[in-house]
Amino acid sequence: MKDFEQMMDRILRIRRINIAILLVLMAWLSASALAGASDAKQAEPKRILVIFSYHYGLPWEKRIDDSLRATLASKLTAPFELSVEHADRVRYPSEAYLNKFIDMLRHKYTHPKIDVVIAVDEEATGILLKHGDELFPGTPVVFLTSERKTLQRDFLKPNMISLLWDADIQGNVDLIEELLPKTRHFFILTGSSISDRAAKKLVRKELSGYTNRLSIDYLPEMTQKDLMEKVERLPENSVLLYVVFSRDSEGKNFVPREILSNISRKANMPT
């Protein structure tokens, strides 16, 4: 148990460091795009819009919001206004809802003009890739995404840049093997949302070279009930590697951090 607690502490510290670096980079990029007047008293406020993919209230979104506000306040000489919207496309995937959301952005943020737009995660990125020119012509756009395709020049206009969030999957697996050397089976857990599936693709790529020495199973998309029953019956010498679970196979949505707590209590093997 001590080794497992040590492993979790190291993983969490790595994650906190990576999040901090990412948030500082986001804030620096936004600040560098916001060249303001030297006299802050006479300068017009710089208007920044952040579009999150999910609904309001998720803990990780609040961390990004808080860090971005604090960093901009410390780095910008000009005043700024930071507005936040939530696309909520996981819960409302219909085209009719999307059209209303786009109309809302147009009405709220066309006048006065936005100086920088930041899209967080795949759904918000997709909206701006398709509708950004219409909504915010010529405005600098920053994509924070796990989809590598947005790094390709064919997808990006001159006013767009993409920051790729990533996870050290191989490093975590190596650490698990070091601290739990009897581990023979890895069960990879992801959900059914667009971002969940993108994360699963990332893990598959990262662990493609491990299958010669480990048994790696990617749990199929399932309901919350079936998932809880599955993790109670994992085989001996296995580990449940939780990636992200924000939606189950029935379309029910979850706060990933909250359902992780339930999963870890139910699981009969280390999570």
Image (cartoon, rainbow, N blue to C red):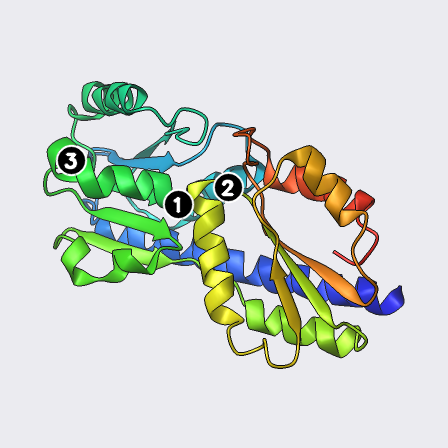
Q: Can residue 118 be seen by looking at this rendering?
A: no
- The image quadrant that residue 7 belongs to is bottom right
Residue 194 shown left or right of residue 223 in the figure? left
- What residue type is disc 1 on? Asp
- The image quadrant that residue 222 belongs to is top right
Give the mark nearer the N terminus: 2 vs 3: 3
- Residue wearing tag 1: 121
Q: Please state, as top left, top right, bottom left or bottom right, where the C terminus lies in the image.
A: bottom right
Furthest residue in direction right, as rendered: 1
Query: What label sits on residue 192 in the rendered view?
Result: 2
Q: The residue tagged with tag 2: helix, strand or loop? A: loop
- Residue wearing tag 3: 136
Q: The residue tagged with tag 3: helix, strand or loop? A: loop
- What residue type is disc 3 on? Phe
Give the mark nearer the N terminus: 3 vs 1: 1
Furthest residue in direction bottom, as rendered: 212
Q: Can residue 112 be seen by looking at this rendering?
A: yes
Name which residue lies at 50% across and 55% down: 200
Relative to the observer, which residue lies in front, 199 or 101?
199
As drawn, 43 above or below 37: above
As drawn, 264 above or below 211: above
